Amino acid sequence: MCKDYDPSFIVNLVEKYLPKNSSIFELGLGAGIDFKELKKSYNATSSDYSQIFIDLYKENFPQDKVLFLDAKNFKLNEPFDSIFSNKVLIHLSKDELKNSIKCQHNNLNKNGIVFHTFWRGEGKEIIENTKFVYYEISSLKYLFYIKEINYNTECEENDSIYLVAQKIQLYHKS
């Protein structure tokens, strides 16, 4: 969505919390920009629910581990130290996001950590047959055990939210 996207903010955030050579699983390969950077320092595996994105990426990087996978409901063969997504979970309904969080929890190592970004806003919309669900910090705090959450600028000032959370679970108020 942003023609001059620079992955350095995301990579620096991951490096702040995740030791080099840890295993990281990316939900949503897209064009592969974040994945190309993450695999430089981590044992990285990516995924996408679009075979087209996977095929385009694999034309240039056939050796990389990329899985066809739906972020709504998945089971991996091995747990990872971290799960990462950049504006991918916004394509899930709120119920689908809760299910994805359960799947992420089940596929993380004991002290696993997640890194996710979301477009900031409220409500949802369909653009060219693609669902977009927007969030504010207040609504995300109820879904994750937050280590760090804040606004980020990707295209326009404070248009995004990033979060870092420890082995995630659904938040249950007593």
Image (cartoon, rainbow, N blue to C red):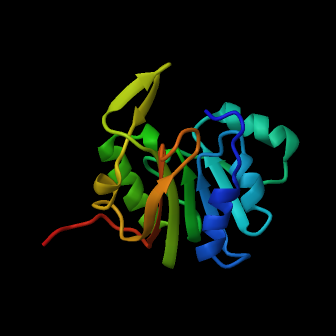
Q: Residue at x 43, y 46 (%)?
A: 72
Q: How many marks?
A: 0
Does 77 sit left or right of 125 as displayed?
right
Does 37 sit left or right of 161 as displayed?
right
Q: Position of residue 124 (x, y in %)?
A: 34, 32
Does 155 sit left or right of 37 as displayed?
left
Q: Residue furthest front?
A: 157
Q: Position of residue 94 (x, y in %)?
A: 31, 44
Q: Position of residue 92 (x, y in %)?
A: 40, 41
Q: Nearer the viewer, residue 76 or 134?
A: 134
Quarter placement of the C terminus = bottom left
**Whether residue 122 is situated above or below residue 15 in the rendered picture:** above
Q: Residue at x 65, y 45 (%)?
A: 29
Does 81 sit left or right of 19 as displayed?
left
Q: Nearer the viewer, residue 70 or 6?
A: 6
Q: Quadrant of residue 165?
A: bottom left
Q: Residue at x 58, y 75 (%)?
A: 17
Q: Residue furthest left?
A: 174
Q: Position of residue 11 (x, y in %)?
A: 67, 62
Q: Nearer the viewer, residue 6 or 71?
A: 6
Q: Residue at x 59, y 46 (%)?
A: 28
Quarter placement of the N terminus = top right
